Image (cartoon, rainbow, N blue to C red):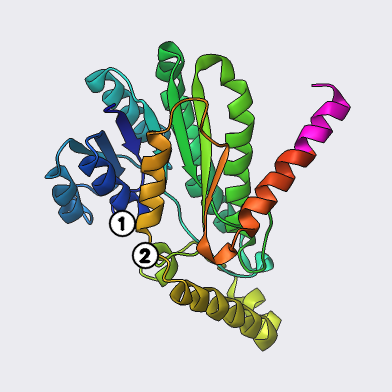
Amino acid sequence: MKKIIFITGTSTGFGKLMVETLSKAGHIIIAGMRGTTGKNEGVAKELNALPNVEVTEIEITDDESVNTAIHNSVNKYGKIDVLVNNAAMAGYGLLEGYSVAQFQKMMDVNLYSVLRTYQAVLPSMRAEKNGLVINITSGASGFTVPFMIPYLTSKFGVEAITEGLQDELKDYGIDNVSIQPGVYPTEMNTGVKTGINADKEDIIAAYGNAATDQFNAMGAAMFGKMAEYKMDPQVIADGVLKLIEMEKGELPLRYPIDAIARGTDHEFIKARADIKAKWRANYGF
């Protein structure tokens, strides 16, 4: 069945591939991105030329922009069946090396933006008593690693929203799923896109070479595995398509797609669910 799908962050990476993949499958796509008449004008024209695709301007850190983009889409198409919160920024560095303002910027882009899109789309989904929200998080969304603490804090938050809303919205026919990717060679990870990185140079310098060496070793390991496993961003777009075409009642809460993890991501998700079930039983709800 053809569905109306709103995707954020479609100028590059996973988002662009999602638009191309879902368009080919016959769905109607509203491709959200910023700079449609500026820096992203070329890709906006490219995606607009695809069947059933409409590119729309959206700045995910601006309440008015998010509300306008989603409300205009609902008014035009009558509803939004699926929202994909894909837009995000990576970030690296020592936690102490992040200013509070820089940390807040990470939260605004990666976490508060998800709250904005939910609050814009939920009234129409509740009225329809139907909907699906897919949130792109991280393969490390249930644990953290050094030098990525602000980024993973934001992704932990999106996981919390996804899990909590699955219960809050169960009476309204709205499903919520987090896709948990591993490390893929998209612009966010290859350095093409500037991340929201640690910005306190004096603190970074005070840590000296030991921290830099540890960070470089971790990065080399991740990127080495990415090459070894030939990580292809297309599998994330294919995963989104698979979720969209699943029947209601079959959708998982969490959907890991990470060949490098070799199944440990699935084990971790199951363990979390089992422990939560016991915790809820102990509390009686």
What residue range appears in magenta? 276-285
User: Is residue 8 left or right of 115 when viewed as pictured?
Assistant: left
Identify the residue at the far left of this view. 49
Picture layout, residue 205 above or below residue 73:
below
Residue at left offset 59%, top offset 28%: 165
Total marks in image: 2
User: Is residue 74 left or right of 189 when viewed as pictured?
Assistant: left
In the rendering, at what x and y percent does residue 229 appear?
47, 71
Q: Is residue 284 magenta?
A: yes
Most common SS among magenta residues: helix
The 10 Å Cα crowd at callout 2, few under 14, some 14 to 19, many 20 or more, is some
Foreground residue among 3 and 193: 3
Residue at left offset 49%, top offset 64%: 183
Q: Secondary structure at mark 2?
A: helix
The kind of residue on which mark 2 rests is: Glu
In the rendering, at what x and y percent does residue 230 appear?
41, 71
Figure quadrant of the C terminus = top right
Identify the residue at the far right of this view. 282
Foreground residue among 285 and 67: 285
Q: Is residue 121 magenta?
A: no
In the rendering, at what x and y percent does residue 166 appear?
59, 28
Figure quadrant of the N terminus = top left
Q: Secondary structure at mark 1?
A: loop
The residue that label 2 is drawn on is: 187
The kind of residue on which mark 1 rests is: Thr
Asked if disc 2 and disc 1 are in contact, CB closer than 8 Å, the reply is yes
Residue at left offset 46%, top offset 33%: 133
The residue that label 1 is drawn on is: 12
Quadrant of the rendered structure where residue 240 is? top left
Identify the residue at the far top of this view. 127
